[in-house]
Image (cartoon, grey):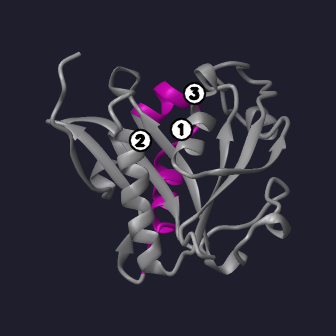
Amino acid sequence: MQKKTIIYREMTPDDFTQVIRLATHVHGEGYMDQTSALKWFNQGIKNNINSHFVAYDEDILVGFRITFSPLQWQLDQWCTPEDWPSEQASVCYFKCNTVDEHYRGYGIGSKLLTLSIDAVKQQGAKAGVSHLWMQSPGNSAVKYFTKCGGVLITKHPDRWNELSKQGYMCPVCNNDCHCSAAEMLISFDQDA
């Protein structure tokens, strides 16, 4: 594929239709809808700083990053903050990084992550945690996050099983997901 000129900018609600379409294609039916898109979007706005970004090739969405601001997301049983090097109050949550399969390998995911990190640092974040899909093709999600500085905290088997019973259709397991998540963290300040 010929090198494309990708335009990066902050996500707005006007992007939701294309974001949901790409999320459904990559992550499976039921991953995101208009209600969750708006909720997630609001969780990434803090101090008038937007931590979500999109990547476009002309008018076609080819990637997006959703990141929750510090103190604007809830811990659950899949989080182990006692093993994090930063206090929960200064940790953002990297909810989703999605790139169209035809645009992978061009640094789009890394650029979206960098833009989000710059934004959440302005919001006061010192680190960011995420749950990476270990069954992604070639375990590419974990490899990508590791390359960007992510450190494995722990592995969580059956991370999305309950969601699959509520309508989420995993692209690997359908409606009985047994995929594992790698809880990983990136520290933004190397001196911390």
Which numbered disc, 2 or 1, marks the residue that appears first in the sequence? 2
Mark 2 → mark 1, Cα distance in angstroms? 8 Å
- In the structure shown, which secondary structural element does the residue marked by tag 1 occupy? helix
Q: Is residue 23 visible?
A: yes
Q: Residue 61: horizontal and vertical position, in percent?
A: 28, 37
Which numbered disc, 1 or 3, marks the residue that appears first in the sequence? 3
Kind of residue sitting beneath label 3: Gly
Tell me which corner region of the image, top left, top right, bottom left or bottom right, holds residue 79: bottom right
**Magenta part, dominant SS:** helix
Check residue 110 for magenta coloring. Answer: no
Rendered residue at 53%/38% (across/down): 144
Residue 28: assigned label? 3
Q: Nearer the viewer, mark 1 or mark 3?
A: 1
Say if 163 sits above or below 49 in the image. above
Tell me which corner region of the image, top left, top right, bottom left or bottom right, holds residue 176: top right
Residue 144: assigned label? 1
Mark 1 → mark 3, Cα distance in angstroms? 20 Å
Which numbered disc, 3 or 2, marks the residue that appears first in the sequence? 3
Q: Is residue 52 visible?
A: no
Residue under pointer 2: 109
Q: Please rate how many residues cluster around mark 2, counting C-alpha atoms within 10 Å: few if below 14, some from 14 to 19, many from 20.
A: many
Q: Residue 123: horizontal and vertical position, in percent?
A: 46, 79
Q: Please rate how many residues cluster around mark 1, counting C-alpha atoms within 10 Å: few if below 14, some from 14 to 19, many from 20.
A: some
Q: Is residue 142 left or right of residue 62?
A: right
